[in-house]
């Protein structure tokens, strides 16, 4: 049986997903800034959960900088919201 995951849970866990993937990739926030052009302080605020609704264009840029798809970011957030863990490489 599959658990239902609400968008609210995914939104709340996006910050954790971003951080988890960044750390799995061995990247600092500064590395992501250099790859994406998104300010390090903005990345930090997303990861801290202070920004819970970044623009989709920012999410796309961050996903590219992390060398993952937006779908992988969402799946990681879903995993943190109670779904099965994913394997991001």
Image (cartoon, rainbow, N blue to C red):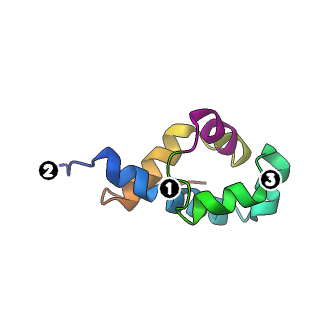
Q: Position of residue 82 (x, y in %)?
A: 30, 60
Residue appearing at x 81%, y 61% in the figure: 30
> Left of 17 or right of it: where is 83?
left
Farthest-out residue, left: 1
- Asked which secondary structure carries label 3, the reply is helix
* Helix, strand or loop for disc 1: loop
Residue 43: in magenta span: no
Looking at the image, which residue sits at the far front? 50
Q: Which residue is mark 2?
A: 1
Tell me the crowding category of disc 3: few under 14, some 14 to 19, or many 20 or more residues within 10 angstroms, Cα based.
some
| Residue 70 in picture, x, y percent from top left | 55, 39
Residue 87 picture location, percent across and down: 50, 56
On the image, which quarter does residue 68 sit in?
top right
Magenta-tinted stretch? 54-62
- Residue at 57 percent across and 66 percent down: it is 48
For residue 24, side relative to residue 9 (left or right): right
Q: Which mark is residue 33?
A: 3
Label 2 to label 3: alpha-carbon separation: 40 Å
**If you read the primary sequence from the N terminus, does the residue marked by circle 2 or circle 1 appear first?**
2
Which label's residue is closer to the chain start, 2 or 3? 2
Q: Secondary structure at mark 2?
A: loop
């Amino acid at each position: 049986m599959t658990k239902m995951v609400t968008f609210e849970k995914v939104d709340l866990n996006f910050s954790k997903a971003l951080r988890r993937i960044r750390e799995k990739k061995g990247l600092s926030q500064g590395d992501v800034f250099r790859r994406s052009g998104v300010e390090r302080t903005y990345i930090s605020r997303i990861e801290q959960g202070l920004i819970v609704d970044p623009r989709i264009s920012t999410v796309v840029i961050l996903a590219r900088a992390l060398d993952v798809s937006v779908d992988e970011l969402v799946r990681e957030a879903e995993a943190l919201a109670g779904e099965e863990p994913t394997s991001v490489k």
